[in-house]
Image: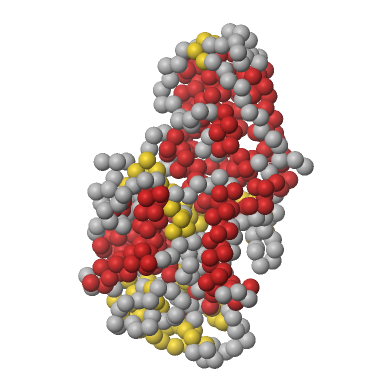
Amino acid sequence: MTDRLVIISPAPTANGDLHVGHLAGPFLAADVCTRYARATGREALYGTGMHFTQNYVVTAARKLGVSPEHLRVRSAEQVERTLAAMGIEVDGFGCIGDRFTKMVLDFYQRLHGQGRLKLRTWRFPFLPSTGEYLMDAYVLGGCPFCLATGYAGICESCGLPVAPGDLIDPRSTLYPDEPLETREAEILVFPVEEYRAELADYFAKTTMRPHMAQMIEDVMAGPLPDFPITQPTSWGIPAPFPEVPGQVIYPHMEGMPWSMFTTALAAERRGAVLVSDDELWRKDSGTTVVYFTGLDATYPFAVVGTAMLTALGEHVVPAQYITNDFYELANEKFSTSRGHVVSGRELAAEVPRDLIRFHLSATSPEFQRTDFTREALVRVTESRLVRPWNRVAAAVDTWVGRGPLPVSERSRQSAQRMVERFAGGYGVRRFSLTAVASTMAEQLARLDQMAAGATKENAGDLCHEVDVFLRCAAPVLIDLAAAALPDTAIPTASDITTVTPAPLPRLTGAGG
Ligand SMILES: [Zn+2]
């Protein structure tokens, strides 16, 4: 059976481009994790995409004066270009289409056919002037759990599900001055509480970062609320169930079939021929699924998604969620509407992307909010990466043409220790880009010292350890590694006795 790692970052809403805050969150981390898995000989697939059916697309399009259909296609194009500009290599980019719709409907028809979905009366804020029920981006108010102002659906601040009818002082996003009524509608829900025992078991053995662990503890302390599967609105995939005519599948609940969809696209792009769309998620597939996600996408996937997969009983359940906190710009939240953003594509046009990838790794918002400034990017990459690397590369270059040089047993051991140190940061269970970046800076500082004292006797050791260092750094420093190495495989155990030094490329600084 293939040992396959499937890495997924939930699709961002198709209401604009990705800024550096997004990239520093799930996307760079997922790319690095995928590259490392491959460098150590594991099959790995990375899937993401764009979420076309959330009504955030509708409200953002209204503000921009374009159609939602236009906005989401434009956003997807921008996002694909931005990911490529940063060297974030996505295997499967899943948006929408007949195959996706079919997978969503198949998934819910199976649950529906087994009697797993329940009809419930749900309260919604209602806008009399348009005759619309309001949910998600259509309605703004206070979160009943953390009190932060935000939209209905999933609270962006605390990550908990917020039923539109539970918002404090709700008001319409598009018509903020119009008074709202409260009306009831019958919708289909998934009764999450019925799967409490399975979820308790599951979370007891799932590795989580502290914020997610706290959220899951809070969630499990009370009754698990029913989660909507359909909504009385028009933007979305039409639900085929006779009990809820005219409703759509709740976009937050497309996540699990979407994950299988993007996995299938990823595998096919890498040459696989699949027998069924969910083949790589079947229980006997050998797949380990890992999500890289902000805390706000965690609840629908980890709690509701896992409970639904448990109910169906045919698929693997995700092994892990590597969550991130917010990445800020000069100690303020990135905000597209206020123009407080750094676009990933613009930055990559001005600064070598290896430096951006290193700096975003070093400041990755893994456990708490962290901060981006251009000044820190220039200063930190200059002192910890560019200058030491260029000195090391210059030292190695002086031995080019004078090899092969001998490699000592001590150097083989040092190289092995270095591989293990990096594995501590790259390994999925305790994956940490900040750990990878600090190991990189530490090891480079050590090699810099070695380079300063290199002699004919130990130059082979230096050249050998620089080669291994570069392989370990390659998942982050993609362009440097591509220019220097014929392949980026990370050695498991080395019995190398001589090395023939090759000229090394230099890094260009981020400028002033
Ligand atoms: Zn909240």
Q: How many marks on residues? A: 0
Question: How is the structure coloured here?
Answer: secondary structure
State the image quarter where residue 339 is shown.
bottom right
Q: Is 35 placed above or below 443 here?
A: below
Where residue 4 sits: x, y (%)?
Answer: 34, 43
Where residue 133 sits: x, y (%)?
Answer: 47, 84
Give the position of the N terminus as an image quadrant: top left
Residue occupying image coordinates x 66% and y 67%: 337
Q: Is residue 320 visible?
A: no
Q: Is 391 placed above or below 403 here?
A: below
Q: Nearer the viewer, residue 199 or 75?
A: 75
Where residue 175 sits: x, y (%)?
Answer: 60, 84
Q: Residue furthest top?
A: 457
Q: Residue furthest bottom?
A: 129
Q: Is residue 414 visible?
A: yes
State the image quarter where residue 383 is shown.
top right
Residue 200 shown left or right of residue 483 in the figure: left
Residue occupying image coordinates x 29% and y 76%: 118
Q: Nearer the viewer, residue 241 or 185?
A: 241
Residue occupying image coordinates x 51% and y 25%: 468
Residue 178 shown left or right of residue 108 in the figure: right
Give the position of the C terminus as an image quadrant: top right
Where residue 364 sits: x, y (%)?
Answer: 57, 47
Residue 305 shown left or right of residue 335 in the figure: left
Residue occupying image coordinates x 52% and y 89%: 130
Q: Residue furthest right?
A: 512
